[in-house]
Amino acid sequence: MNLVGRSLPTTRGGYTLVEMIIAMVLVSVLMSSVWTIMSLYNSLLTAGRDRTTEQQLVRSLFELMHDDLAGVNVAEPTPSMMEFGDTLNDLTFVAPLPSAATNTGLQPSPFEEQPFDGRQTTEAESRVGELSLSGTSTALRLRIRTFEPPTFHTASDMDLLNELGGGSAMQQQDVGNVTEFQTVVYQMITAENGGSADSVSTVLVPGLYRIQSDTQSVDALEAGQSTAELQRQVNSIEISRQNLLLLMQAEDQLTLASEPDSRDFSNLPQADIESIPEVINCRFEYFDGSRWLSSWTADRLQGLPEAVRISLDVVSQKDLRQRDETYPLPTTDLTSAPEASASETISSHSTDDLYPQAIAARRYSRTILLTPTDAGLPGGSL
C-alpha cells in the first residue's frame, strides 16, 4: 500500500493555548460581573440599613428635644400640637403644660390655703422652681418640670386575708403626680475641646451631649467651681468639662486615684448623660417674633422665644469608625506640667488639624414653636 502523499486523520487530545486563554478571559469577566453585582447589592442594602438607623436616631432626638421644650413652655393653654409636613424638616408646636403659671410652676392657687412655717423663702430656693430657657448657637439649657406617674399599692395575699381587719392596701394612699424640677443641657463637644485638661489622659468623645439632673444639685455643683474651672468654661450655658467628667464618673461609679480635686463621688448628683457621637454639629436658633437670634438669655422680661430652630449634621457610624482609626483623638497628660495655666491647658489644635478630610454629613432641621404666632417664620421650614 502506498501511503505517500496522503495525510492521515488525527484526533485532538486537548485545547490549544489560545482557546485556554479565551476561556479564562471569559470566566474572569463573568466572575467579575457577578462580584460587582453582589457588591452593589450588598452596599445598597447596607446603605439602606444605615440610613434607616440614622433616620430613627434623628427622629428620636427631635422628639426628645420636643418633650424637653414642652417641660419649659409656660404659655397659656393652646391647642395640643400642630405639625406641618411629614418629613424631618417640619414645624412642630409644643403644647404647654397644664396649670402652668406665667413665670414659675410654683404659683399657688388663690383658693388654696398655704401653710406658713415662719421663715422667708431664699432667692436660691425660689430659683429652683423657675422654668427658663437660655442658650447659644451650640448649647441649650432648660429648667423644666417633669411629672412622675402615680404609683399605686398592689394588694398582697396577706392584705386579702386581713381584708376584714383592714389591710395595708386600705391604708396606702396614691402618691399622685409629683412635680420635679430638672435642668437639661444640650451641648456640643468638638474635637478641639474634647481633650480634657481636668484629668489625666481623659478624652471626651466628640458629639452632642444631653445632661439631665436635679436643678438644685446642678446649681450647687456649679457654685463650687474653682476660678480655673470658670476660666476654662466657654460660657455659662454649658456644663464645664470638669463637672461633666465628674458626673460621668459618678454615673459609672468610677473613682480615679489621680483626680486633682479628690471629690467624693457619692455626694455628686445623679445625672442622666447621653452622648450622640453621630451628631458632629448642632446649631440652635431662637425666634423673637421678628428675627432669628443666635443666643437667648433666661430673662423674665424677655420670656421664652416664640420658636426654636434646631439643625443637626449627622454622619454614619461607619464614617465615625473610619475617622477614629485614621485620626485618633489626642490625650492630655498633666503630670509633666501640673502648674500650667488655664489658657495653656486648652488644646491648641483646631478641628481642621485633627480631621483634615471632611466627613460627608447630612443636615436635618426642625422648627419647634413655643408660642403660637400669626406671622411667618423667616427662613423657617414651612
Image (cartoon, rainbow, N blue to C red):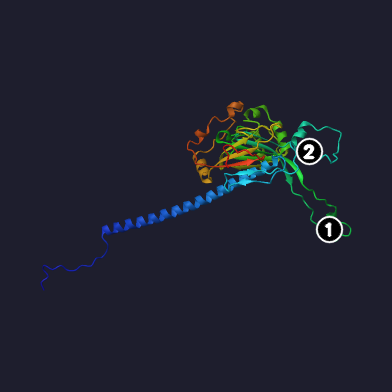
Residue 261 in the image: above or below residue 44: above
Q: Nearer the viewer, residue 307 or 319?
A: 307
Residue at far right of view:
165
Residue 347 in the image: above or below residue 7: above
Residue at far bottom of view:
1
Q: Position of residue 162 (x, y in %)?
A: 86, 59
Residue 224 in the image: above or below residue 22: above
Instruction: Give the left or right position of residue 239, taking residue 328 as reference.
Output: right
Q: Secondary structure at mark 2?
A: loop
Mark 2 = which residue? Answer: 107
Instruction: Give the left or right position of residue 47, taking residue 216 as reference.
Output: left
Q: Quadrant of residue 111?
A: top right
Q: Secondary structure at mark 1?
A: helix
Residue 159: mark in rendering: 1
| Residue drawn at x 59%, y 26% as measured from the top left | 343
Q: Position of residue 192 (x, y in %)?
A: 55, 33
Q: CA distance from mark 1 to mark 2?
A: 40 Å
Q: Quadrant of residue 133?
A: top right
| Residue drawn at x 56%, y 31% as measured from the top left | 347
Task: Name the kind of residue labelled 2 in the image.
Answer: Gln
Task: Name the kind of residue labelled 1 in the image.
Answer: Asp
| Residue drawn at x 77%, y 34% as measured from the top left | 126
Q: Position of residue 72 (x, y in %)?
A: 70, 39
Characterize the local packing of mark 2: few (<14), some (14-19) or many (20 or more) Cα atoms within 10 angstroms.
Answer: few
Residue 101 can be seen in this image: yes
Characterize the local packing of mark 1: few (<14), some (14-19) or many (20 or more) Cα atoms within 10 angstroms.
Answer: some
Label 1 or label 2, whichever comes before in sequence order = 2
Instruction: Name the quadrant of the N terminus.
Output: bottom left
Instruction: Name the quadrant of the C terminus.
Output: top right
Residue 205 can be seen in this image: no
Residue 322: mark in rendering: none
